[in-house]
């Protein structure tokens, strides 16, 4: 009975800290519920028992009762001290990563997440793959505004700030997929800025590392372009199938006539595609917001830019 | 009132003239007599009209938001529009409605009357505060017309520095409205200190006035910080001075500290006056001396004081140091104690009372139920480890709606129904008022209870899209918001109807003992024909009512609250700090 109730209220417990957090959650709800029922029952009982029967009723003067007042000051104080200490202990656990934790760098960009495995040269976008029963420490920063890294199944949340690093950690206790949300409002696509956390077994994780650690130097340009397009989060705003999103779709873009927001037109040739990546706010297609990040010129190598242009050219 | 103990006054009972032909509503006519009035009652009424309009706008926006959330993806508006609407809903409800709601509207009308004064200490400042408020509202409307704002009502940097919407005019609007709030606060403090009638000792002040006093202190001390913060934000946006934006060398978390240093105490600007109303309603409708007068009066001040020290509990996951979070969490729980004491005092006051469940009392009981839920969930959010999970989810949204709407708005509605006969001299239809109260109570819970569940399950706030698991809860909540709309429409109908067709209200329809019931309904221009003299506590229902209608005999000007020019000596007026209930 209680278990079903708990399942209804909270997401599954999939990290080592979840059980303790949930324990406090249920403790406050249950003691609060008892208090609430007590108060409501008293109000209803008094309202019925002492309802006005005639207009000339005289009521007794009861101005205070020291014993009662001390009781209802001291008992709640004890209760909140319990709640405080319990929450304090859990907070320490949530904030203190074990020293053997495996570190992953997280970057929040409006509106996608990048996960970089520093030792393995792997970069993932909107997907994080981690081994089960292994503490993972996340070093997080934001490329632009404040975001927040929130995984309900793990009971963790931490704001991701520009210009400084924040950290959080978790140890997943079972294999499976969990959703991760951005919890700090960050603009148009805030609610679409989620990612999937795939918790896999030790063996699967090894396979994943081998698969992902491909040599990008040897990759054909178009393939590298597709990979870069996904890793840099381009698909958060640009579709490749003609769907209209925050920015124009890439399908059929190459060699089309573009009407710009200053009224002029331009042909989307190779150089236009390149200019739109490195200096995206100079020539903006009419009807779309002028809000594409301007940092790609610095982030991408020349080969990656060439690869992106090659990839976009093929999207006819 | 240190001087009154040595003074003697001749007093007599002043019978109340029922429904006098000339009252504050009709003694002067024409638009100018309203726009440039110095009468606190008329200014309060203009505030009341303004906040009703603001509440209507904010409420319509809320229904729009809830309707959009009927389906997981776009229902009828796009993401940017949704973001603008939830920002406007917050800004309008916080700055234009709830902060001025009880103090500036009901407080303005009743604070001087309940003190036995002719007006507030600075009537011109009072009028200025209304005009400054209106100017701020014009700025807010200008922002809506020029692109709106999409930052959330919190204007968090660096998003608010970078977004393309009308942030500057909107923050200037909030900045200007802050001045109006400060003016009202200063005025109320001065009035309570200097304008009390003979015999109105601190211990005989109605608890509504104690709550307004505590609120005014917060308004005066906290609002300047909001002003500075918003001005810094405007400077950063307009002039590129780096304060909060890391791209310019600033610190975004600093903004959050500044913002919540005001906005947490502001929560008490919103809820403490509601506590005052509840004290009035519970005593009048149970005909009983309040239980623990000083505990309630002083806990308002305690809440005002502790409220300044807990702002960091909005920032447990913001990247502030863990040690700060621990200290802020610890202090936060100590707001819970005086608040809990108040609730238990109110419930105990009902014991052996003579309880009449008229509409205002119904609202007081609804308040007790909803506010208790808001309070318990506040303890939940104060607990550090649980807060990490619940922060910025619908659990928080539900919590503050239970406190702000379930608490303040329902107390405001209780106060409005309690004082409606006094303000307008008309009775509303009791049956429809009760129907509406019950609908609102049910609708409120249908709207916000599911949000606790969604939030616990991990539904983040300010989301235009959501995953399908949450759809059922969202739809229940949306249906609730429509029901709330129906409840308010019924209320609007019977209240407007009462103005035209309502029965004339007697001077004291509920049998209250505070001074506003000792003058006509509606009151005359100068509130009283005499200077009231108070010899009992505000809730001494066991004393005969004629002893609450005393005034200085022979005083015929109604002006001199502290004068005793005639020097007649017949009956000594008691003074000192006794509550009259001991």
Image (cartoon, coloured by chain):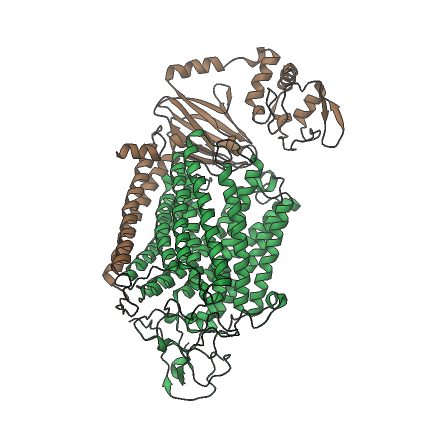
Chain colours: A brown, B green
Position of residue B128 relative to residue B525, above or below, is above
At 44% across and 56% down in the image, what residue appears?
B413
B561 relative to A75 in the view: left or right: right
Position of residue B578 relative to residue A71, above or below, is below
Find the residue positioned furthest to the right: A264
Name the image quarter holding residue B165: top right
Position of residue B532 relative to residue B277, above or below, is below
**Quick one: quadrant of the N terminus of chain B?**
bottom left
Q: Nearer the viewer, residue B235 or A235?
A: A235
Q: Is residue B391 visible?
A: no
Name the image quarter holding residue B358: bottom left
Count of residue discs: 0
Q: Nearer the viewer, residue B31 or A285?
A: B31
At 57% across and 61% down in the image, what residue appears?
B130
B451 relative to A309 in the view: left or right: left
Residue A81 location, x and y as percent? 30, 48
Residue A276 location, x and y as percent? 68, 25
Q: Nearer the viewer, residue A276 or B31?
A: B31
Q: Is residue B87 visible?
A: yes
Residue A249 location, x and y as percent? 62, 23
């Amino acid at each position: 009975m209680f278990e079903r109730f708990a399942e209804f209220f909270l997401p599954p417990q999939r990290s080592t800290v979840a059980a303790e957090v949930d324990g406090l959650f249920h403790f406050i709800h249950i003691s609060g519920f008892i208090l609430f029922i007590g108060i409501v029952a008293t109000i209803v009982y008094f309202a019925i028992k002492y309802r006005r029967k005639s207009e000339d009723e005289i009521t007794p003067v009861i101005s205070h009762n020291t014993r009662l007042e001390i009781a209802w000051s001291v008992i709640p104080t004890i209760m909140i001290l319990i709640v405080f200490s319990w929450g304090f202990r859990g907070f320490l656990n949530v904030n203190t990563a074990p020293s053997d934790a495996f570190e992953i760098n997280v970057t929040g960009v409006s509106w996608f997440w990048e996960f970089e495995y520093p030792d393995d040269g792997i970069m993932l976008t909107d997907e994080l793959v981690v081994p089960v029963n292994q503490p993972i420490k996340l070093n997080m920063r934001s490329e632009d505004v404040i975001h927040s890294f929130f995984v309900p199944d793990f009971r963790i949340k931490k704001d991701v700030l520009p210009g400084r690093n924040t950290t959080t950690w978790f140890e997943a206790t079972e294999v499976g997929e969990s959703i991760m949300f951005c919890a700090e409002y960050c603009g148009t696509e805030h609610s679409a800025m989620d990612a999937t956390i795939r918790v896999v077994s030790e063996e699967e994780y090894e396979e994943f590392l081998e698969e992902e650690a491909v040599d990008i130097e040897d990759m054909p340009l178009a393939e590298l372009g597709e990979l870069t397009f996904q890793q840099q989060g381009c698909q958060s705003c640009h579709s490749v199938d003609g769907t209209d999103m925050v920015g124009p779709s890439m399908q059929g873009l190459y060699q089309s006539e573009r009407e710009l927001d200053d009224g002029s037109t331009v042909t989307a040739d190779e150089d236009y595609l390149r200019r739109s990546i490195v200096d995206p706010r100079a020539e903006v297609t009419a009807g779309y917001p002028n809000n594409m990040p301007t940092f790609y010129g610095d982030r991408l190598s020349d080969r990656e830019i060439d690869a992106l242009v090659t990839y976009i050219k093929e999207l006819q | 009132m240190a001087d009154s103990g040595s003074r003697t006054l001749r007093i007599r009972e002043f019978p109340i003239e029922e429904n006098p032909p000339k009252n504050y509503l009709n003694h002067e006519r024409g638009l100018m007599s309203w726009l440039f009035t110095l009468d606190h009652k008329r200014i309060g009424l203009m505030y009341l009209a303004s906040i009703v309009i603001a509440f209507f706008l904010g409420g319509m926006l809320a229904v729009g938001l809830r309707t959009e959330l009927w389906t997981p993806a776009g229902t009828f508006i796009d993401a940017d529009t949704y973001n603008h609407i939830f920002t406007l809903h917050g800004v309008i409800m916080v700055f234009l409605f709830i902060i001025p709601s009880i103090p500036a509207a009901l407080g303005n009308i009743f604070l001087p009357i309940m003190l036995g004064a002719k007006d507030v200490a600075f009537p011109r400042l009072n009028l200025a505060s209304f005009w400054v408020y209106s100017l701020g509202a014009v700025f807010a409307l200008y922002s809506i017309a020029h692109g709106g704002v999409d930052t959330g009502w919190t204007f968090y940097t660096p998003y608010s520095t970078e977004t393309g919407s009308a942030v500057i005019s909107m923050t200037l609007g909030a900045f200007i409205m802050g001045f109006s709030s400060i003016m009202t606060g200063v005025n109320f403090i001065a009035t309570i200190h200097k304008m009390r009638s003979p015999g109105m000792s601190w211990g005989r002040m109605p608890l509504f006035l104690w709550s307004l006093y505590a609120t005014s202190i917060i308004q005066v001390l906290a609002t300047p910080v909001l002003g500075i913060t918003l001005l810094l934000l405007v400077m950063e946006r307009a002039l590129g001075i780096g304060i909060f934006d890391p791209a310019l060398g600033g610190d975004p978390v600093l903004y959050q500290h500044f913002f919540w240093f005001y906005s947490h105490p502001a929560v008490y600007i919103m809820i403490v006056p509601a506590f005052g109303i509840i004290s009035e309603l519970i005593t009048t409708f149970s005909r009983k001396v309040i239980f623990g007068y000083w505990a309630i009066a002083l806990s308002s001040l305690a809440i005002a004081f502790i409220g300044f020290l807990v702002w960091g509990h909005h920032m447990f996951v913001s990247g502030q140091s863990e040690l700060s979070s621990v200290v802020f969490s610890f202090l936060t729980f100590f707001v819970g104690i005086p608040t809990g004491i108040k609730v238990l005092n109110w419930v105990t006051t009902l014991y052996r009372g003579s309880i009449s469940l008229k509409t205002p009392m119904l609202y007081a009981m609804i308040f007790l139920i909803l506010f208790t839920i808001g309070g318990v969930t506040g303890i939940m959010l104060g607990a550090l480890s649980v807060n990490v999970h619940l922060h910025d989810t619908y659990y928080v949204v539900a919590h503050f709606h239970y406190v702000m709407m379930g608490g303040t708005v329902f107390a405001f509605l209780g106060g409005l129904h309690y004082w409606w006969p006094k303000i307008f001299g008309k009775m509303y239809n009791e049956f429809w008022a009760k129907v509406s109260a019950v609908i609102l109570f049910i609708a409120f819970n249908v709207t916000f209870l599911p949000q606790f569940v969604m939030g616990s399950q991990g539904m983040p706030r300010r989301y235009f899209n959501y995953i399908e698991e949450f759809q059922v809860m969202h739809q229940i909540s949306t249906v609730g918001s429509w029901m709330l709309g129906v409840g308010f429409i019924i209320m609007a109908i019977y209240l407007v109807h009462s103005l035209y067709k309502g029965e004339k209200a007697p001077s004291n329809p509920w049998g209250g003992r505070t001074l506003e019931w000792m003058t006509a309904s509606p009151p005359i221009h100068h509130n009283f024909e005499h200077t009231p003299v108070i010899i009992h506590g505000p809730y001494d229902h066991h004393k005969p009512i004629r002893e609450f209608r005393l005034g200085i005999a022979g005083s015929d000007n109604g002006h001199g609250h502290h004068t005793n020019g005639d020097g007649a000596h017949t009956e000594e007026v008691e003074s000192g700090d006794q509550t009259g209930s001991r």
